[in-house]
Every structure is written in structure tokens, then in C-alpha cells.
Amino acid sequence: MAHYLWTRDLGRAYRVAEATQCGIVGVNDGSPATPQAPFGGNKL
């Protein structure tokens, strides 16, 4: 599962990323995962 967020406020981006229950958070990016990066998993 992934969440996506668009903001100009870096502090808000960190707060949202830390509060969310998912494995990937995309900040100002519609495709945050790459084949070279390890998958963070799901936090259920």
C-alpha cells in the first residue's frame, strides 16, 4: 500500500509520513518506488 502527498511544507510532509500506516509515502511524486529500492512493506 502507498500514500501520496503534495505539499510545499516539508514539516507537514514528515508529519504525514510518520503518521500514516503504509509502506511507501510519495511526497510530490506520483511514483515513489523504483525497482532498485527495497520495499518498505505494509504496516497493518
Image: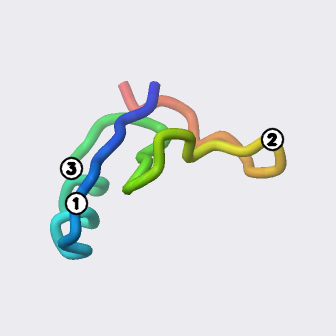
Query: 28 or 44, which lies in front?
Result: 28
**What type is the residue that disc 2 sits on?**
Pro
The type of residue carrying mark 1 is Thr
Pinpoint residue 24: horizontal percent, then vertical percent.
48, 42
Q: Is residue 6 above or below residue 40?
A: below
For label 1, the crowd category at 10 Å Cα-Cα, with few meaning under 14, some 14 to 19 and many 20 or more, is few
Which mark identifies residue 30? Answer: none
- What residue is drawn where x is 22% and y is 69%? 8
Q: Position of residue 31 (x, y in %)?
A: 56, 40
Q: Left of 43 or right of it: where is 19?
A: left
The residue tagged 3 is: 19
Secondary structure under the numbered disc 2 in the rendered image: loop
Q: Would you call the spot at circle 2 few (<14 residues within 10 Å), some (14-19), or many (20 or more)?
A: few
Q: State left or right for residue 32 relative to residue 16.
A: right
Query: Does 20 sit left or right of 39 as displayed?
Result: left
Above or below for 3 versus 32: above
Check contact, mark 3 vs mark 2: CB within 8 A.
no
Image quadrant containing the C terminus: top left
Q: Image point 63% across, 43% down: which residue?
A: 33
Mark closest to the chain's N terminus, 3 or 1: 1
Q: Earlier in the sequence, mark 3 or mark 2?
A: 3
Q: Which numbered mark, 3 or 2, is in the foreground of this view? A: 2
Q: Amino acid at mark 3?
A: Ala
Q: Which of the pair 42/36 is nearer the observer?
A: 36
Q: Which mark is residue 35?
A: 2
Check the image and name the residue furthest to the right: 36
Q: Based on the displayed image, in which of its 4 quarters is residue 39 positioned?
A: top right
Q: CA distance from mark 3 to mark 2?
A: 25 Å
Q: Circle 3: is it few (<14), some (14-19), or many (20+) Cα within 10 Å?
A: few
In contact (CB < 8 Å): disc 3 and disc 1: no
- Marks 1 and 2 sit apart, C-alpha to C-alpha, by 25 Å
